[in-house]
Image: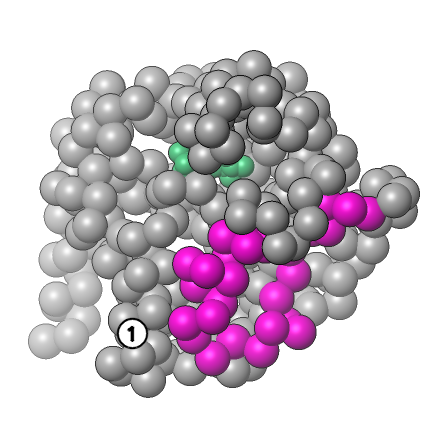
Amino acid sequence: MRVIIEPTAEQGSQRAASMVAQLIRKKPRAVLGLATGGTPLRLYQELIRMHQTEGLDFSRVVSFNLDEYVGLPPTHPQSYRHFMTENLFRHINIDIRNTHVPDGRALDYETYGSQYEASIAEAGGIDMQILGIGRDGHIAFNEPGSSLGSRTRLKTLAPETIRDNARFFGGEEEVPRLAITMGVGTILESKKCIMLAFGKEKAEAITAMIEGPVTAQVTGSALQFHQDVVVILDEESASQLGRREYYDEVEEAHRRLQSENTN
Ligand SMILES: N[C@@H]1[C@@H](O)[C@H](O)[C@@H](COP(=O)(O)O)O[C@@H]1O
Protein backbone atom coordinates (compact mmCIF):
# COMPACT_ATOMS: atom_id res chain seq x y z
CA MET A 1 0.00 0.00 0.00
CA ARG A 2 1.48 3.34 -1.00
CA VAL A 3 0.66 6.15 1.42
CA ILE A 4 0.97 9.69 0.08
CA ILE A 5 0.53 12.53 2.55
CA GLU A 6 -0.07 15.96 1.04
CA PRO A 7 -0.31 19.13 3.13
CA THR A 8 -3.96 19.80 2.14
CA ALA A 9 -7.04 18.11 0.68
CA GLU A 10 -6.68 20.42 -2.31
CA GLN A 11 -3.20 19.14 -3.10
CA GLY A 12 -4.22 15.54 -2.40
CA SER A 13 -7.12 15.87 -4.84
CA GLN A 14 -4.85 17.32 -7.51
CA ARG A 15 -2.48 14.41 -7.04
CA ALA A 16 -5.36 11.96 -7.52
CA ALA A 17 -6.63 13.87 -10.57
CA SER A 18 -3.24 13.65 -12.25
CA MET A 19 -3.27 9.87 -11.72
CA VAL A 20 -6.73 9.59 -13.31
CA ALA A 21 -5.66 11.86 -16.19
CA GLN A 22 -2.51 9.86 -16.79
CA LEU A 23 -4.57 6.66 -17.05
CA ILE A 24 -7.08 8.21 -19.48
CA ARG A 25 -4.31 9.62 -21.68
CA LYS A 26 -2.66 6.22 -21.82
CA LYS A 27 -5.91 4.28 -22.19
CA PRO A 28 -8.76 6.37 -23.68
CA ARG A 29 -11.22 3.51 -23.04
CA ALA A 30 -10.29 3.33 -19.36
CA VAL A 31 -12.86 1.89 -16.97
CA LEU A 32 -13.14 4.08 -13.88
CA GLY A 33 -14.75 3.09 -10.60
CA LEU A 34 -16.29 6.20 -9.07
CA ALA A 35 -17.29 7.19 -5.57
CA THR A 36 -19.67 9.76 -4.08
CA GLY A 37 -19.63 11.73 -0.83
CA GLY A 38 -17.84 14.92 0.11
CA THR A 39 -14.33 13.49 -0.31
CA PRO A 40 -14.04 13.09 -4.11
CA LEU A 41 -15.67 16.46 -4.89
CA ARG A 42 -12.39 18.36 -5.31
CA LEU A 43 -11.00 15.53 -7.44
CA TYR A 44 -14.04 15.83 -9.74
CA GLN A 45 -13.63 19.62 -9.89
CA GLU A 46 -10.02 19.17 -10.94
CA LEU A 47 -10.99 16.62 -13.63
CA ILE A 48 -13.59 19.08 -14.95
CA ARG A 49 -10.92 21.78 -15.07
CA MET A 50 -8.57 19.42 -16.92
CA HIS A 51 -11.32 18.64 -19.42
CA GLN A 52 -12.20 22.28 -19.97
CA THR A 53 -8.73 23.78 -20.10
CA GLU A 54 -6.44 20.92 -21.11
CA GLY A 55 -8.81 18.93 -23.32
CA LEU A 56 -8.78 15.79 -21.15
CA ASP A 57 -11.02 13.54 -23.23
CA PHE A 58 -13.63 11.36 -21.52
CA SER A 59 -15.48 10.43 -24.71
CA ARG A 60 -14.55 6.75 -24.54
CA VAL A 61 -14.24 6.40 -20.77
CA VAL A 62 -16.58 3.92 -19.06
CA SER A 63 -17.56 4.34 -15.41
CA PHE A 64 -19.11 2.24 -12.66
CA ASN A 65 -20.20 3.78 -9.39
CA LEU A 66 -19.81 1.97 -6.13
CA ASP A 67 -23.29 2.27 -4.72
CA GLU A 68 -26.77 3.81 -4.62
CA TYR A 69 -29.52 4.28 -2.04
CA VAL A 70 -32.46 1.94 -2.39
CA GLY A 71 -35.77 3.56 -3.26
CA LEU A 72 -34.41 6.81 -4.67
CA PRO A 73 -35.12 7.57 -8.33
CA PRO A 74 -32.15 8.93 -10.32
CA THR A 75 -33.76 12.38 -10.27
CA HIS A 76 -33.84 12.54 -6.46
CA PRO A 77 -31.42 15.29 -5.35
CA GLN A 78 -29.72 12.90 -2.90
CA SER A 79 -29.45 9.94 -5.26
CA TYR A 80 -25.90 9.07 -6.23
CA ARG A 81 -26.87 9.17 -9.93
CA HIS A 82 -27.94 12.77 -9.46
CA PHE A 83 -24.73 13.50 -7.51
CA MET A 84 -22.61 12.16 -10.37
CA THR A 85 -24.54 14.07 -13.02
CA GLU A 86 -24.27 17.35 -11.14
CA ASN A 87 -20.72 17.03 -9.87
CA LEU A 88 -19.01 15.42 -12.83
CA PHE A 89 -20.86 13.92 -15.80
CA ARG A 90 -22.64 17.01 -17.12
CA HIS A 91 -19.41 19.02 -17.09
CA ILE A 92 -17.28 16.61 -19.13
CA ASN A 93 -17.68 14.83 -22.47
CA ILE A 94 -18.37 11.35 -21.08
CA ASP A 95 -21.03 9.42 -23.02
CA ILE A 96 -23.81 9.05 -20.48
CA ARG A 97 -24.56 5.56 -21.87
CA ASN A 98 -21.12 4.51 -20.66
CA THR A 99 -21.83 5.58 -17.09
CA HIS A 100 -23.22 3.05 -14.62
CA VAL A 101 -24.66 3.78 -11.21
CA PRO A 102 -26.57 0.96 -9.49
CA ASP A 103 -30.33 1.38 -9.87
CA GLY A 104 -31.90 2.06 -6.50
CA ARG A 105 -35.29 1.04 -7.92
CA ALA A 106 -34.36 -2.44 -9.14
CA LEU A 107 -37.03 -4.98 -8.27
CA ASP A 108 -34.94 -8.09 -7.84
CA TYR A 109 -31.72 -7.01 -6.16
CA GLU A 110 -30.07 -10.40 -6.31
CA THR A 111 -30.38 -10.61 -10.09
CA TYR A 112 -29.56 -6.94 -10.42
CA GLY A 113 -26.34 -7.36 -8.39
CA SER A 114 -25.18 -10.21 -10.65
CA GLN A 115 -26.00 -8.13 -13.73
CA TYR A 116 -23.97 -5.21 -12.40
CA GLU A 117 -21.02 -7.54 -11.81
CA ALA A 118 -21.44 -8.97 -15.32
CA SER A 119 -21.38 -5.49 -16.89
CA ILE A 120 -18.14 -4.67 -15.05
CA ALA A 121 -16.61 -7.90 -16.35
CA GLU A 122 -17.90 -7.20 -19.88
CA ALA A 123 -16.24 -3.79 -19.84
CA GLY A 124 -12.96 -5.55 -19.05
CA GLY A 125 -12.91 -4.88 -15.30
CA ILE A 126 -12.23 -1.65 -13.45
CA ASP A 127 -8.85 -0.10 -14.24
CA MET A 128 -8.89 2.44 -11.43
CA GLN A 129 -11.29 2.53 -8.51
CA ILE A 130 -11.67 5.80 -6.59
CA LEU A 131 -12.62 5.24 -2.95
CA GLY A 132 -13.52 7.26 0.12
CA ILE A 133 -13.84 5.81 3.61
CA GLY A 134 -16.56 6.06 6.25
CA ARG A 135 -15.67 7.03 9.83
CA ASP A 136 -16.15 3.37 10.79
CA GLY A 137 -13.70 2.28 8.09
CA HIS A 138 -16.28 1.15 5.51
CA ILE A 139 -15.72 1.32 1.75
CA ALA A 140 -18.68 1.86 -0.59
CA PHE A 141 -21.58 0.75 1.69
CA ASN A 142 -19.77 -2.32 3.02
CA GLU A 143 -20.59 -1.67 6.63
CA PRO A 144 -18.69 -3.30 9.52
CA GLY A 145 -19.26 -7.05 9.44
CA SER A 146 -19.59 -7.25 5.64
CA SER A 147 -17.94 -10.28 4.13
CA LEU A 148 -14.53 -9.48 2.71
CA GLY A 149 -15.48 -11.65 -0.27
CA SER A 150 -18.83 -9.92 -0.86
CA ARG A 151 -20.17 -8.96 -4.30
CA THR A 152 -22.69 -6.35 -5.43
CA ARG A 153 -25.77 -6.74 -3.24
CA LEU A 154 -28.23 -5.10 -0.88
CA LYS A 155 -26.88 -3.76 2.43
CA THR A 156 -28.52 -2.24 5.49
CA LEU A 157 -26.83 1.00 6.52
CA ALA A 158 -25.17 1.15 9.93
CA PRO A 159 -26.43 3.74 12.44
CA GLU A 160 -23.13 5.74 12.18
CA THR A 161 -23.53 5.98 8.40
CA ILE A 162 -27.15 7.09 8.74
CA ARG A 163 -26.05 9.77 11.22
CA ASP A 164 -23.14 10.89 8.98
CA ASN A 165 -25.34 11.17 5.92
CA ALA A 166 -28.29 12.83 7.68
CA ARG A 167 -26.74 16.23 6.84
CA PHE A 168 -27.55 15.69 3.17
CA PHE A 169 -31.15 14.66 3.80
CA GLY A 170 -32.17 17.20 6.42
CA GLY A 171 -32.52 14.62 9.20
CA GLU A 172 -31.82 10.99 10.10
CA GLU A 173 -35.41 9.95 9.46
CA GLU A 174 -35.09 10.85 5.78
CA VAL A 175 -31.97 8.73 5.10
CA PRO A 176 -32.79 5.49 3.25
CA ARG A 177 -32.03 2.41 5.36
CA LEU A 178 -30.86 0.25 2.46
CA ALA A 179 -28.35 0.59 -0.32
CA ILE A 180 -27.12 -1.47 -3.23
CA THR A 181 -23.34 -1.61 -3.18
CA MET A 182 -20.38 -3.24 -4.85
CA GLY A 183 -18.93 -5.81 -2.47
CA VAL A 184 -15.48 -5.81 -0.93
CA GLY A 185 -14.62 -8.70 -3.27
CA THR A 186 -15.77 -6.62 -6.27
CA ILE A 187 -13.57 -3.70 -5.21
CA LEU A 188 -10.57 -5.97 -4.63
CA GLU A 189 -10.75 -7.04 -8.29
CA SER A 190 -10.10 -3.50 -9.57
CA LYS A 191 -6.68 -3.25 -11.12
CA LYS A 192 -5.76 -0.19 -9.07
CA CYS A 193 -7.42 1.53 -6.12
CA ILE A 194 -6.99 5.19 -5.16
CA MET A 195 -8.33 5.92 -1.71
CA LEU A 196 -8.82 9.51 -0.62
CA ALA A 197 -9.37 10.61 2.98
CA PHE A 198 -9.19 14.14 4.29
CA GLY A 199 -9.85 15.75 7.66
CA LYS A 200 -9.31 14.72 11.26
CA GLU A 201 -12.62 12.84 11.49
CA LYS A 202 -11.10 10.23 9.14
CA ALA A 203 -7.81 9.82 11.10
CA GLU A 204 -8.97 6.86 13.19
CA ALA A 205 -10.46 4.92 10.28
CA ILE A 206 -7.36 5.54 8.16
CA THR A 207 -5.01 4.29 10.88
CA ALA A 208 -7.12 1.17 11.37
CA MET A 209 -7.29 0.58 7.63
CA ILE A 210 -3.56 0.95 6.95
CA GLU A 211 -1.93 -0.23 10.15
CA GLY A 212 -4.55 -2.34 11.89
CA PRO A 213 -5.38 -5.99 11.32
CA VAL A 214 -7.44 -7.06 8.32
CA THR A 215 -10.94 -7.38 9.69
CA ALA A 216 -14.50 -7.31 8.43
CA GLN A 217 -15.11 -4.73 11.18
CA VAL A 218 -13.08 -2.25 9.09
CA THR A 219 -13.86 -3.26 5.53
CA GLY A 220 -11.27 -0.83 4.11
CA SER A 221 -8.57 -2.97 5.76
CA ALA A 222 -9.23 -5.64 3.09
CA LEU A 223 -7.29 -3.36 0.74
CA GLN A 224 -4.16 -4.68 2.48
CA PHE A 225 -4.66 -7.74 0.27
CA HIS A 226 -4.69 -5.67 -2.91
CA GLN A 227 -1.47 -5.35 -4.85
CA ASP A 228 -1.89 -1.79 -6.11
CA VAL A 229 -3.45 0.66 -3.67
CA VAL A 230 -2.53 4.32 -3.32
CA VAL A 231 -3.89 6.11 -0.26
CA ILE A 232 -3.86 9.89 -0.54
CA LEU A 233 -4.20 11.78 2.73
CA ASP A 234 -3.91 15.29 4.10
CA GLU A 235 -2.05 16.13 7.31
CA GLU A 236 -5.21 15.78 9.41
CA SER A 237 -6.28 12.34 8.24
CA ALA A 238 -2.64 11.16 8.53
CA SER A 239 -2.26 12.55 12.05
CA GLN A 240 -2.66 9.23 13.91
CA LEU A 241 -0.47 7.04 11.72
CA GLY A 242 2.30 5.26 13.64
CA ARG A 243 4.68 4.84 10.69
CA ARG A 244 4.37 8.33 9.24
CA GLU A 245 8.13 8.87 8.88
CA TYR A 246 8.54 5.70 6.90
CA TYR A 247 5.76 6.68 4.44
CA ASP A 248 7.46 10.04 3.89
CA GLU A 249 10.78 8.31 3.27
CA VAL A 250 9.20 6.02 0.69
CA GLU A 251 7.70 9.03 -1.10
CA GLU A 252 11.03 10.82 -1.05
CA ALA A 253 12.67 7.72 -2.60
CA HIS A 254 9.92 7.67 -5.29
CA ARG A 255 10.57 11.33 -6.08
CA ARG A 256 14.32 10.76 -6.35
CA LEU A 257 13.81 7.79 -8.66
CA GLN A 258 11.43 9.75 -10.87
CA SER A 259 13.75 12.73 -11.23
CA GLU A 260 16.68 10.41 -12.03
CA ASN A 261 14.55 8.76 -14.71
CA THR A 262 13.51 12.03 -16.28
CA ASN A 263 17.04 13.51 -16.23
N1 LIG B 1 -21.14 5.17 0.42
C1 LIG B 1 -20.40 6.32 0.76
C2 LIG B 1 -18.91 5.98 0.73
O1 LIG B 1 -18.54 5.61 -0.59
C3 LIG B 1 -18.10 7.18 1.20
O2 LIG B 1 -16.73 6.88 1.13
C4 LIG B 1 -18.49 7.54 2.62
C5 LIG B 1 -17.72 8.74 3.15
O3 LIG B 1 -18.29 9.93 2.71
P1 LIG B 1 -17.62 11.35 2.78
O4 LIG B 1 -16.65 11.39 1.65
O5 LIG B 1 -18.75 12.32 2.56
O6 LIG B 1 -16.97 11.47 4.10
O7 LIG B 1 -19.87 7.86 2.62
C6 LIG B 1 -20.80 6.90 2.12
O8 LIG B 1 -20.99 5.91 3.05
Observer-nearest of 219 and 8: 8
Tell me if 124 is positioned left or right of 17 in this view. right
- In the image, residue 42 lies in the stretch drawn in magenta: no
Q: Which residues are magenta?
A: 80-106
Name the spot of residue 73 as percent of width and height, x first.
69, 49
Q: Nearer the viewer, residue 192 or 200?
A: 200
* Nearer to me, 205 or 95: 95
Image quarter of the C terminus: bottom left
Q: Position of residue 246 (x, y in %)?
A: 19, 32
Quadrant housing residue 186: top right
Residue 125 percent location from the top left of the image: 65, 61
Question: Type of residue at label 1?
Answer: Met
Crowding at mark 1 (Cα within 10 Å: few <14, some 14-19, many 20+): some
Say if 91 sits above or below 225 in the image. Answer: below
Q: Residue at x 49, y 23 (%)?
A: 171
Residue 96 is inside the magenta segment = yes
Q: Is residue 76 left or right of residue 111?
A: left
Check the image and report above or below for 180 versus 89: above
Which residue corresponds to the image point at 33% horizontal and 84% vertical from the top-left? 55
Side of 82 relative to 4 (left or right): right
Q: For the point 18% across and 71% down, which residue is it?
A: 261
Q: Secondary structure at mark 1?
A: helix
- In the picture of the structure, the residue carrying the numbered disc 1 is 50
x and y percent of residue 128 in the render? 50, 58
Identified at 42% across, 58% down, the residue is 87
Q: How is the image coloured?
A: one colour
Q: Residue furthest front?
A: 170
In the rendered view, tell whether residue 38 sits above or below residue 60.
Answer: above
Asked whether residue 18 appears in the rendered view, the answer is: yes
